[in-house]
Image (spheres, rainbow, N blue to C red):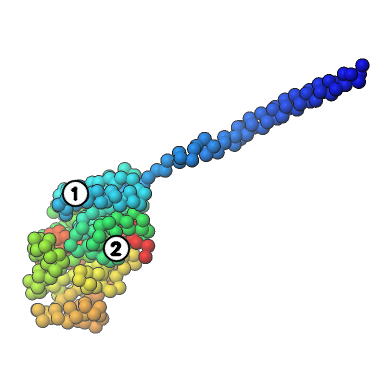
Amino acid sequence: MLKEHLPWIIVAVVVLVVIVVGVLLSRSSGDAYHGLLRRGKARPPREHFRSDDDPSPVALKHAAVIINPTKFADLVAIRARITAGCHAAGWGDPVFYETTVADPGRGQARQAVHDGVDLVCSLGGDGTVRSVASGLIGTDTPLGILPAGTGNLLARNLDLPFDNIDTAVTVAITGRNRRIDVGELVIGDPEHDLDGDTRDATEPGDPADPEHPGTTTYHFLVMGGLGMDAAIMAGTNENLKNKVGWPAYMLSGVKHLVSPEFRTRVQIDNGDPFRRRARMVVIGNCGRLLGGLVLMPNARVDDGQLDVVIASPRGVVGWVPVATRIATRQRKGHPTLDHRTCQEISVRTDRPVPVQIDGDVVGEASSVRATVRPGVLTVRVSHV
């Protein structure tokens, strides 16, 4: 009898064992699963729920482009080129702002930073670059330079492309960050020195010096100057400049070779003041000019210093050796070409003289004070 039922008994035992083991394994794995949940490790990898053709979305970077609309006849076309350049680099649509007479770029740059863009580009001349940069000082948002002016001096000094907007866009998006210095120039009221208190004059967007209410504070990236160089800028014909470019400055320069001298009282850092007769005083953050000329061979945009050139040639003939020294980059030993370096300089003149900031004439003054602000601006430059 036992022999007859033995096979069935064995089958029943096997089935019972399988059921018991299955229940135990199920309970064990369930306990493990809930334990993993408690430790936050039970969620399968994200790719288990995603097909190969459904990649996770990546947040695109965005640039703000601040345009001087007076530089372009077809704004739609230039916007399309910039947008195409951003897309080609894997960035999203750029955000465009336009400068105005009341706000040539600083307010737009600050708004762009507030909006959280990854890059702020200036599209215009040196004045637009300066205004946009003034809104980025002290921030970590980099400045991209898309040159569209006559001089494009900062672009030249940073070896950036200044004659191809598409290449400039590529460098602005894919380049490396470089910290550079910024110059700060406080200009006194033409009828008063820096101790005057006649009025509160401010550049649009720039606060007046709180210690000297009768002053205006500007930032410069390339150079600030007073005397002949500012007179040249003021005397350059705009129509001619638009037609022939920077050679228009040369014609104005010839006209101003006999600009009258002015007496100066100069103080470098905390040194003793000294007096000079001068035709121009140039204070530079970098030294390269138009036409391949280098006024300040040792000037660097990130050396924490300002370079100063005081030129005092006598008459037209006196400019010949000065021009030779500038062309050959020789500065030492010439009696009418004084070259200094400093972190701060104050200049007072015996009468109001024209003043320029990065090529823009900002009026006349008889007192100026310039200081350097080391490394406060981030600029996007090429990797080479």
Q: Quadrant of residue 375?
A: bottom left
- Residue 75: which disc? 1
**Amino acid type at mark 1:** Leu
- Residue 52: which disc? none
Tally of marks: 2
Secondary-structure class at tag 1 = helix
Residue 71, position in %: x, y?
16, 54
Q: CA distance from mark 1 to mark 2?
A: 23 Å
Residue contact at pointers 1 and 2, CB within 8 angstroms = no
Pointer 1 or 2: first along the chain:
1
Which callout, 1 or 2, points to the residue nearer the camera?
1
For the point 22% across and 69% down, the residue is 289
Residue 283, position in %: x, y?
23, 67
- Location of the N terminus by quadrant is top right
- Location of the C terminus by quadrant is bottom left
Residue 159, position in %: x, y?
30, 65
Check the image and name the residue furthest to the front.
4
Of residues 97 and 362, the one drawn nearer to the viewer in this rendering: 97
Q: Residues within 10 Å of mark 2 (few under 14, many from 20)?
A: many
For the point 23% across and 62% down, the residue is 163
For the point 14% across and 60% down, the residue is 361
Answer yes or no: is residue 236 visible. Answer: yes
Q: Quadrant of residue 127?
A: bottom left
- Residue 160: which disc? 2
In the figure, 333 relative to 340: above or below? below
Q: Quadrant of residue 262?
A: bottom left
For the point 20% across and 62% down, the residue is 358
Residue 38, position in %: x, y?
61, 32
Answer yes or no: is residue 136 visible. Answer: no
